[in-house]
Amino acid sequence: MAQDSLAIQDSQVEPPKSMDLVAPSEVKQAFKRIKLDGIAAVVGDYVILESDIEKTLIDLKSQGVSDQDVNRCQLLGKLMEDRLFAHQAVQDSVLISDDEIAAIGERQLQQLVSQAGSLDRVLKVYKKEDEESFRQELNKINKLRMLSERMQTKVVEEIEITPEEVRQFFNDIPKEERPVFGAELEISQIVKTPQAPEEEKQKVIDKLNELKADVEDNNASFSVKAILYSQDPGSKSKGGFYPMSRETPFVKEFKDVAFSLQEGEISDPFESPFGYHIIYIEKIRGQELDLRHILMVPEVPSSAVKAAIDELKDIKKKIEEGAFTFAEAALNFSDEKETKFDGGVLRNPTNYDSRFELTKMDPSLYKQVSNLKDNEISFPIEEPDPRGGQTKYKILKISNRYGEHTADFARDYMKIQELAKTEKQLKAINDWRGTHIEDTYISVSKSNRDCDFANNWVKE
């Protein structure tokens, strides 16, 4: 009963008063509030309101999900599941800093404002009176989501799969039910990156030092300088702004400099794979940084581009003449460290496998290889860096071709291993969920107890 009382209090707009001190009209108003936004369920320390279900349904509709694909009971079950993981995360002292939550909320708000055109439009769409209440709502949602995700990660993080388990998983699948994998390609490449001469690099360094001095000595705006001069397409329009933590996937050179600076400090020019930068630290919040940076890329002369293309043409010719294999040429001549030591073989970023399924391949890569025949080598292809780095030139070859086929244990081992590990993780999650549903205080409102839940939330 104590838990039920607490749950109702959490759903009220105002703190509860002792009933013998409250006028009848106030009691009536309190019950109206509860009825208007009633409690759908309680999981541990979390209350799920009927309005939470409606908000989730609205969000899904905005993402294009049809009413026919989901119903209220399914949504309630998912909300209860999220709160079960979040509740246990708190019990297990899974920590998420306020700075981390605030940084994520800030990025989301910036993205929403960018899409809507103004903060006022965002507040109107989400029916919030002011920015602060919207931020609080974002932070609350993000904290719960992150707690849930990290608890699930904790449950499965130590799960490994042995070769014997993979074999058993595969053998347990009836032959007629084994998965069918789509047509796949193995692709190799040799890359040349034309380099700017030293005098061009020095020009960029001198310009960055000039911009730094103008900000430090004349109080010029770093943000305006970034808009005018930065060549980073991801941040130029935002005045070079990025929020960053140590987990943010920036290159090492950039992170090392960023975390060596004090608040308000501007770095000296430094080099990364993308070009030359200066960084200004706008704010430090624990392990989170708000920074602005300016990227400038030294100009590569047309003579260097022509030399790179001519070299690739010469490598292609010599491979076709049998002077060396494609793999040998990649090892000896390619500028791309990530592939040259593996014979130029490209790795699928989703699973680090050497195969790319045609239906899931990056459209730009598919366009480059779609017309290549077996053992044919492409002519040099220009590949600009979408993140603002140096333009590369490459030649491509299809190393192997695999048609659509039913899963084969030897040929598709890595994919089968991935499926087996996923099944093992799902089983661990299901077992964990079942155990903690029994151990956690859970109450489902009478109006929702008839739901056909996938889990035993009603504890029948």
Image: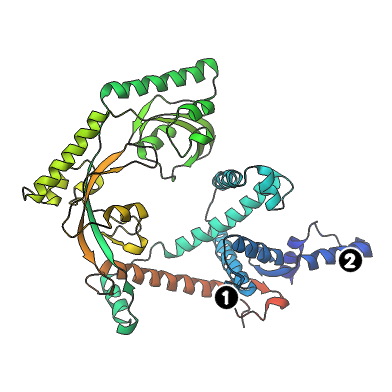
In percent of the image, x 79 and y 57: which residue is there?
13
Please, what secondary structure does the residue beneath circle 1 have?
helix
Q: Residues within 10 Å of mark 1 (few under 14, many from 20)?
A: few
Q: Is residue 63 visible?
A: yes
Name the amino acid, label 1.
Glu
In-front residue for pair 106/437? 106
The percent position of residue 416, horizontal first and vertical second, equals 31, 71
**In whole angstroms, how far apart are the C-alphas of marks 2 and 1?**
36 Å
The percent position of residue 265, horizontal first and vertical second, equals 49, 25
Q: Is residue 45 visible?
A: no
CB-based contact (under 8 Å), mark 2 and mark 1: no
Say which residue label 2 marks: 28
In the displayed structure, 415 sits above or below 167; it is above
In the displayed structure, 227 sits above or below 38; it is above
Work out whether mark 2 precedes mark 1 in sequence or the reverse, and give the earlier one: 2
In-front residue for pair 450/5? 450
In-front residue for pair 275/4? 275
The percent position of residue 109, horizontal first and vertical second, equals 60, 46
In the displayed structure, 178 sits above or below 341; it is below
Quadrant of residue 403 within the rendered picture: bottom left
Quarter of the figure that contains the N terminus: bottom right
Name the amino acid, label 2.
Lys
Say which residue label 1 marks: 438
Please, what secondary structure does the residue beneath circle 2 have?
helix
Q: Residue furthest top?
A: 217
In percent of the image, x 47 and y 42: which residue is there?
245
In-image side of 288 versus 166 (left or right): right
